[in-house]
Amino acid sequence: MRLLEIEYGGAEHVGCTERDIRNFEKEQRDEQKGFDAETLIEFFESEKEKNSEFFFSYETDSEGRFCRCFWADHVSRGAYSVFGDVVVFDTTYNTNKYGMIFAPFVGVNHHHQTIVFGCGFLSDEKTESFVWLFNNFIESMPNGAPNVIITDQDPAITKAIAYVFPRTVHRYCLWHILSKFSDKLAPVTFRVHYPSIKKVIENSTSPDEFERSWKEVIKCANLENNDWLSLMYDMRQKWVPAYLNHVFCAGMSSSQRVESSHAFYKSYVSKKNTLMDFVIRFNRALRHQRHNELVADHVDINEHPKVKSNWPMERQMVKLYTRKKWLEFQRQIYESHGYYLQQKAVDDGCMVYDVISFQSSSISKPRVLSHNQQMDYISCSCMKFEFEGIPCRHMLAFFRINQVFKLPEKYILKRWTRDAKVGGEHLLGQKNVGDNPEKCLMSRHSKLSYKAAMVIDNASLTDEGTNFLDEQLDYVLLKIKEINVSRSIDIGCQKNKSIEGVPTIIDPSEIRTKGCGKRLTSSKEKQVSKSRQCRGCGLRGVSHDKRNCPMLHDGYLSMVYELVCFLICPMFVVFMYSVSYQYKC
């Protein structure tokens, strides 16, 4: 309403009230009842017409009811071709009025910002639904399956990933598993032994070290017979860092990134939205997210971080890394000055060093750095470079001591540089738009909008020009409608025709998922839960208290109740008498 007041020069010139607008909105929603799924598919088809690289797929059940869909635009597909090596997948609820499960595929770009590769709606959380979703994801993406996928510990998702992504490393969310320890262990055991268990999980550098330390700490806590811990130990290859840190995961060990994006999206959507409303609001959130990437690109082009030393390697990488990754690399350079190397062994052309901190105590364990002289490659036991793609401070200490002034190309990941999108397919589908602009709806609309804006700006300067353009627009609109009707492409007529008839795709029914909470309670159960507690038997009831409690009328309980009253009442009288006497004194 405020926008209309600004546009028309005051509320008195709008021609309606805020209540009229809300009533009109309600009427529009009522007209769309029963046609939500069909409207969504029509929207996807129009997006496909605008850009042929837009991908969508959907399915209906045996009754013709909408049950699942997947979509990804050309920007998301292009981003996957550059940053699709690591994918985080998680489901969320309460995003639409049907209770359908929203399932986005996300990753990180070269600024370490969250980006979306594709989205889906599911009506259930069965293995078959996830298999269908993952197959459409692979079909839509240019580079096939990702190298790593991070998910929650869900059996249905685990089975679907093993079936669709057999060569992809599947990693469970470490944060979710650690958060379950407080529920699976006794309170005293958790308070005493959880810090040592967590230390073993996070600080073990090799599988052998983890298995040895795990058995010791579990034995110390007397948890050998804990079934949940035994199950977690059996699947340790999917969540313990010591088994997975050698695989590049872009620094992610949990699905919290996608969960934080869920919170971001839910600031735009609500559980009252229809499917079409959700997609429109979600696209708005997606545009804001992509705008943040453009802002970060602008900062990298126009701003130059300060260099703290004269080391040539620092000056080399400040021109290559994005600002986010450069600050991480600069911190590693600064910390590398606190370490020195001590040669440990020589084995078949491989030099082994202990990287020791100047401030370390005698009991602290040094990092082990191996230098393969034949391949001229170094690796550190902390696995930071393998896991995050940034050289660690121990490697940088080796370079500094051995007077390596430039970081070798093999230690520079292009995905963290400013030129990460150069030479890739990040602009996938835009060639299709430019090659044939006359057939693109978006291009035609932009061309006409520009000319129409110029005509309106010039005509509105005078009354004669305004009246002339008003008459000509009526004539032009009439002619265009005749052209559209003759070619049967009048979208408005087609839409009204589909609404008047029976929809070909039935809207989904309301869905109850695993994450929707407790069961629904009846009105009588709600009254009982809100009623007062009987002081005689301790139970609750709508018309139930100590005066009409059936248990108090039994012989034994009635006798006990009267005996308690007989003993307590005189004591209470004496107490009140003493208090009143002291007050008078």
Image (spheres, rainbow, N blue to C red):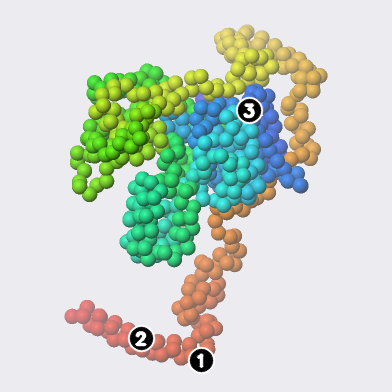
Any part of residue 101 in sight: no
Residue linked to disc 3: 54
Displayed quadrant of residue 474? top right
Amino acid marked by disc 2: Ile
Where residue 166 appears, x then y in whole percent? Answer: 58, 42
Q: Residues within 10 Å of mark 1 (few under 14, many from 20)?
A: few
Q: Secondary structure at mark 1?
A: helix
**Mark 1 / mark 2, whichever is N-terminal:** 1
Q: Is residue 249 above or below residue 463?
A: below
- Residue farthest along the left direction in this orientation: 585
Mark 2 vs 3, N-terminal side:
3
Q: Nearer the viewer, residue 178 or 379?
A: 379
Q: What residue is shown with label 2? A: 568
**Marks 1, 2: nearer the viewer:** 1
Q: Which comes before the other along the chain, label 3 or label 1?
A: 3
Which mark is drawn over residue 555? 1
**Residue 529 in the image: x percent, y percent?**
52, 67
Q: Write the residue at 39% across / 50% down.
A: 208
